[in-house]
């Protein structure tokens, strides 16, 4: 089985369409989305419709929950708050109904999925060794998938040891060995210095050496300047356009 794992689309339609084009060409069986379909970007309704149509499973992220009013807007800093207010105003009924049905965690065979982390699926960032250890301790499946930080990450748990770090484009991992915690990075607002849309390919049949199953970190170029122009046209905060060029 081949699975495309996406996270943090953030209403960036051009990034999502570019990634979906690669998925369509690649013969994938399932698409898993780890949340934050909306927030920050200029096309929340179009992105919600595409994810609803395509995803086998989709989680709720903190931005989705704020836009729905399930988390108070005061949880957000200025730029995120301004974008969330704008998103609330233009979100249509279909998008609202779709997002309202999502949870911040889910399971698939062999995998546990969280928007944030296993200890707090909505808000927690897996960016420290401490949180990574607690995330492995709180789960049992071979594969743990998280989003939320917008940084592509691969960690493995071997006995008491923890290995890994950020995951560049093309990084490949054997899924048959130690337990893994992977973050695909963000489709719509990467923050690891590579402005291309980030996502993750899982292939349960492929082998690295004698292993069983392979994960590949993917990056897809998209027309950043089109999303930037749309952000400016909607008078969303300028920093949300600017950062896309640098992947920060
Ligand atoms: Zn996010």
Image: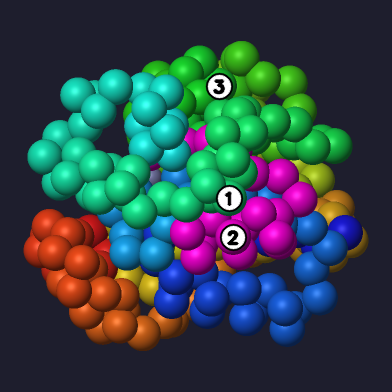
Q: Does the magenta-highlighted stretch encompass residue 56?
A: yes
76 and 165: which is toward the camera: 76
Q: Earlier in the sequence, mark 1 or mark 3?
A: 1
**Dot 1 corresponds to which residue?**
94
* The residue carrying mark 1 has its beta carbon less than 8 Å from ligand 1: no
The residue indicated by pointer 3 is 118
Q: Position of residue 132 (x, y in %)?
A: 47, 26
Which of the colour schemes (rainbow, by chain, secondary structure, one colour) is used? Answer: rainbow
Q: Which mark is residue 241?
A: none
Q: Establish if 101 lies above or below 191.
A: above
Magenta portion: prevailing SS class: helix
Where is 177 relative to 101, above or below? below
Number of other residues with Cα within 10 Å of mark 2, as a class: few under 14, some 14 to 19, many 20 or more: some
For the view shown, which residue lies furthest in the front direction? 93
Q: Secondary structure at mark 3?
A: loop
Q: Is residue 20 above or below residue 92?
A: below
The answer to the question of whether label 2 and label 1 lie on touching residues, with beta carbons closer than 8 A, is yes
Residue drawn at (25%, 50%) of the image: 86
- Residue 59: x and y in percent read 59, 38
Q: Which residues are magenta?
A: 45-63
Of tags 1 and 3, which is closer to the observer? Answer: 1
């Amino acid at each position: 089985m081949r699975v495309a794992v996406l996270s943090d689309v953030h209403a960036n339609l051009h990034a999502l369409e570019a990634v979906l084009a690669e998925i369509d060409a690649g013969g994938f069986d399932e698409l898993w989305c780890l949340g934050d379909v909306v927030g920050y970007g200029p096309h929340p309704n179009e992105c919600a419709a595409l994810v609803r149509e395509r995803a086998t499973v989709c989680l709720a992220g903190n931005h989705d929950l704020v836009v729905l009013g399930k988390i108070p807007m005061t949880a957000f800093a200025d730029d995120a708050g301004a974008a969330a207010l704008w998103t609330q105003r233009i979100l249509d009924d279909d998008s609202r109904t779709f997002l309202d049905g999502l949870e911040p965690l889910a399971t698939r065979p062999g995998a546990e999925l969280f928007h944030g982390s296993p200890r707090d699926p909505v808000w927690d960032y897996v960016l420290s060794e401490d949180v990574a250890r607690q995330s492995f301790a709180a789960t049992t499946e071979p594969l743990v998938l998280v989003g939320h930080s917008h940084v592509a990450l691969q960690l493995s748990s071997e006995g008491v040891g923890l290995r890994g770090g950020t995951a560049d484009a093309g990084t490949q991992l054997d899924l048959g060995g130690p337990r893994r915690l992977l973050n695909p990075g963000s489709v719509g607002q990467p923050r690891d210095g590579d402005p291309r849309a980030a996502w993750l390919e899982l292939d349960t049949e492929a082998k690295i050496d004698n292993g069983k199953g392979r994960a590949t970190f993917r990056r897809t170029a998209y027309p950043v300047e089109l999303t930037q122009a749309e952000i400016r046209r909607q008078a969303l905060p300028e920093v949300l356009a600017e950062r896309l060029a640098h992947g920060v």
